[in-house]
Image (cartoon, grey):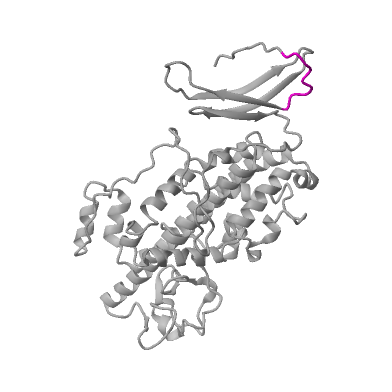
Amino acid sequence: HPVEEFKLCSRRWLGDIVLVRLHKEPYSFYPTDNWYCSFVEVVSPHGQCYRFPCYQWIEGYRTLELREGKGRGLRAGRRHMGDDLVSLGARTPGLFPHICSAPPSPRQGELRLKGFLSCTNSWAKLDDINKVFCFNKTPITEYVLAHWREDTFFGYQFLNGVHPMVIRRCTELPCNFPVTPAMVASSLGETPGLPWGSSRIHTPGMHQPGPPILLCLSPTPAQLSQCPSPDSPIFLPSDSEWDWILAKTWVRYAEFLVHEAVSHLLLTHLIDEAFALATLHQLPMCHPLFKLLLPHTHCTLHINVMARTLLLRRGGIIERAMGSGLEGTKVLMAKGMSCLTYTSLCFPDDIQERGVDCIPNYYYRDDGLKIWSAIESFVSGIVRHHYHSDAHVLADCELQAWADEIFREGFLGNEASGRDHVNPELCSRWSPGSIRGPLGGISGLHDSGG
C-alpha cells in the first residue's frame, strides 16, 4: 500500500510527541469511503522518529486518537473505542447489564439464521421431522434419524453431542436420586455396589425441573424431577418402550433448555459481551492487549443486540418456542450466573473440576485441550513480551481497570467467582502467568455468533 508523506510546520517546539489525532471528514460531493490505516510515523526536525500504530479500518466520519507505539505512561482523559457506544440498558436481576444498541459496522459480516426459518408449524407426528431434512441431508442427520431411539447413541450424545460440557463424574448419588443396585443390574451387571468410578451422572435440569440421569455410555435410571415421590418414579431401560423413550425425551429437552439459556446464550454470547465492553471501555486502542483481543470480539455486540431484539423480548422466539418461556429462561440464566467462576471459563480447569479428564472417547476434551494449548502458546508469547514481571502487570493501570470492570460487571462482584483472579485490589493475581487464563478464554470465544 502507498505511504503518503506530509510536511507540517509548527511555530513552537512540541517536545516529545505522545499522541496524534486522525480526522476523517466529508470531502466535497464524494461518497464516504472506508480507510484502512496501518500506522502514522512522525519525524521531528532533529531526526527523531515517533511511530503510532493503528492497523484498523476507519469507517464513516470520525476522529481517531493514536498513542505512540511504546505505550509508556497513562494518558489522562484518554478516549476509547467504547466511548462511541450508547448507554447500558436496564439490568435483569441476577444478570449483568447490556448495551441497547451497537454502532453500525458494514464489515460485521452476515449475521442471520439459515435453513429452518421457514419451519414455523409444530410437528404433529415423528415422521414430520424427516421432512425438515429433505433438502438438508448429511451423513450425520441420516445416522441420527436411524439411531436416535438407541440407548447407546443417547448416551454418546452427552459425551460428544452439541452439549458435551455438563457431563461430570459421579462419586456419590445425590440424596434426591434414590437409585438402588437392583435398578441398574440389567445395565451394569451384578456388582456388590454401583461402579461409581466408571459412571457419570448428568443433571441437565440443575436449574430446571431437573431430571438427573446416570450414564455409563448408555443411560441406566432417569428421574423426571428433583423431588422423588410416587408421582415422580425412576424410569429404567427395562420399562415399556414408550415409557423409556418419553423419559429420555424429557431429559433431552431439559438439557436443551440449559444448553440454550446457560451454555449458549449466557456463557457464550453474554459473558463474551462483558469482556468485549471492558476491552472497549478500559483499554486504549494502542494497548497490546486491546490489539490482541479486538479481533475476537468481532460481531459480538451486534449479534447480541439482534438476539435481544428477536429472542429476549415479549412475543419473541424464546417465549414462543421454549417451554421455560421468557421469564423462566431469565431465571435459568440468573442461576447459571450464580455458578459462574473464573476457572469454569478456563478449559483445562473445567475438565478437571468435572472429573472427566480420563474417560475414553471424549473427543470434546481431546480436541479442546489441543485448541486451548495453541491459544495459550500464542497468548503467552504476547503477554511475556510486554509484561516481564508481576510489577509490570500491577503498574498497568489500564489493565487493572479492565480486570476491575470484568469482576464488577461480568461476575457481578461475586466473591465466590474467584476474586483472586479478577479483583485488581489484590496483588497476587494478574501476574504474567495468571493473565493468560482470561485472555485465552476470551480468544477461544472468537466468532461466537451462532
The residue closer to the viewer here, 55 or 134, is: 55
Answer yes or no: is residue 255 visible.
no
The residue closer to the viewer here, 249 or 262, is: 262
Q: How far from the left and from the top, in percent, is residue 247? A: 33, 74
User: Which SS type dominates the magenta stretch?
Assistant: loop
Answer yes or no: is residue 400 visible.
yes
Which quarter of the rendering shows the N terminus?
Answer: top right
Q: Image quarter for residue 212?
A: bottom left
Q: How far from the left and from the top, in percent, is residue 323? A: 34, 67
Work out whether 178 lies above or below 80: below
Q: Is residue 256 magenta?
A: no
Say whether residue 304 is left or right of residue 413: left
Q: How far from the left and from the top, in percent, is residue 9? A: 70, 12
What residue sits 30% from the left and 73% below the top?
246
What residue sits 41% from the left and 52% below the top?
308
Q: Is residue 17 magenta?
A: yes
Q: Image quarter for residue 32?
A: top left
Work out whether 218 lies above or below 227: above
Residue at the bottom extreme, as displayed? 230
Say whether residue 156 is left or right of residue 79: left
Magenta part of the chain: 10-18
Q: How far from the left and from the top, in percent, is residue 276? A: 56, 46
Work out whether 181 lies above or below 438: below
How many numbered dots are placed on residues in this image?
Answer: 0
